[in-house]
Image: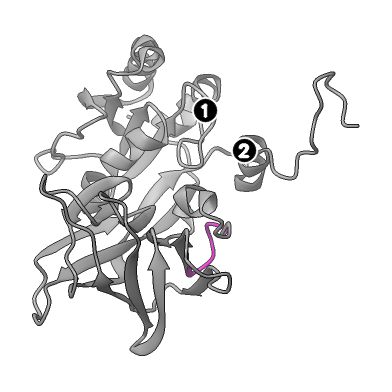
Amino acid sequence: MGRHTVLLVNQEKSDAVRAAPVVRDLIRRHGTLVLEGDARSCPPLEGLDRLDLVVVLGGDGSLLAAVPEAAERGVALLGVNLGKLGFLAEFDLRAFERHAPSVLGDGLLSFRELGRLAVEVVPAGGEGARAEGVALNDVVITAGPPYRMIALSLSIDGEPGPEISGDGLIVSTPTGSTAYNLSAGGPILAPTVQGVAITPIAAHSLSFRPIVVDSASRVEISLLRANSSESGEGTTLAIDGRPLTQLEAGERIVVRRDRQVVRFVTNPDRSYWATAIDKLHWALAPRFRDGSGS
């Protein structure tokens, strides 16, 4: 009978649009296509009677857009990347075609369960959240225009921590550790690690280093100094690369482990570390113009 599958295609990516007929045909051949939509804004999935799988064409960014709906329904995601292999979108088109009978039919699936971070913004002197969201990759406080340094105070599990001056702070899951966190000098966390990385952005200090805390920890960041501008921009809280809300001095950002996990179908031909080596060119020796290593 096969799996009941939703197909999401990033309509801004020509390779994804060209591949869609092939993937659509495979879904119908081995299972049931119950819905098709644009991967840039995942359609509501709650009205579907039966749903087993969400297939996304377009890469890691397209997958992130589908995470909230899939997590709410407890449905697994499968990413088909038409460019370079991603950390979330593990299949290229050839690999998907090869495994389609098992993945889309009634074969056994291999999953990776990834945790998320729940975040709340608490107003100065208040208790209730004025804004909240959930992140699969990271929660980022960024200085914003007019780009003066901001000041933050960090607390972990109620223990007062350091004050930080700089361009902001990243709180990252293992999934997001290879994204902004890595670019800012943070560590790579294996997806099975139960931890959260806290990494400063251009800290005005030589001694503030990224740290890793338990994923069950409550991380609280207080804004001591923030930026604001006449245009309404300024210091901003972003979740998975998308702005959530502007921030003001005196507000607190509380980050903790979310109760839901997200399941991704893994490619049996590809390991996480193989992807890390290929995608990040991990430990690749310098090369000179003649192509030699010396």
Specify whether 43 is left or right of 277. Answer: left
The percent position of residue 232, horizontal first and vertical second, equals 11, 49
Mark drawn on residue 99: 1
Residue receiving disc 2: 270
For the N terminus, give its image quadrant. Answer: top left
Judge the density around disc 2: few (<14), some (14-19), many (≥20) Cα neighbours within 10 Å: few
At x 41%, y 84%, the residue is 161
* Rendered position, 293 above or below 28: below
Residue toward you, 221 or 105: 221
Tell me which numbered mark, 1 or 2, is placed earlier along the sequence: 1
Residue 64: quarter of image: top left
* Rendered position, 201 above or below 78: below
* Rendered position, 132 above or below 5: below
Q: Amino acid at mark 2?
A: Arg
Specify whether 272 is left or right of 55. Answer: right
Q: Is residue 52 visible?
A: no
Residue 47: quarter of image: top left
Q: Is residue 9 part of the magenta span, yes or no?
A: no
Q: Which residues are magenta?
A: 190-196
At x 39%, y 77%, the residue is 216
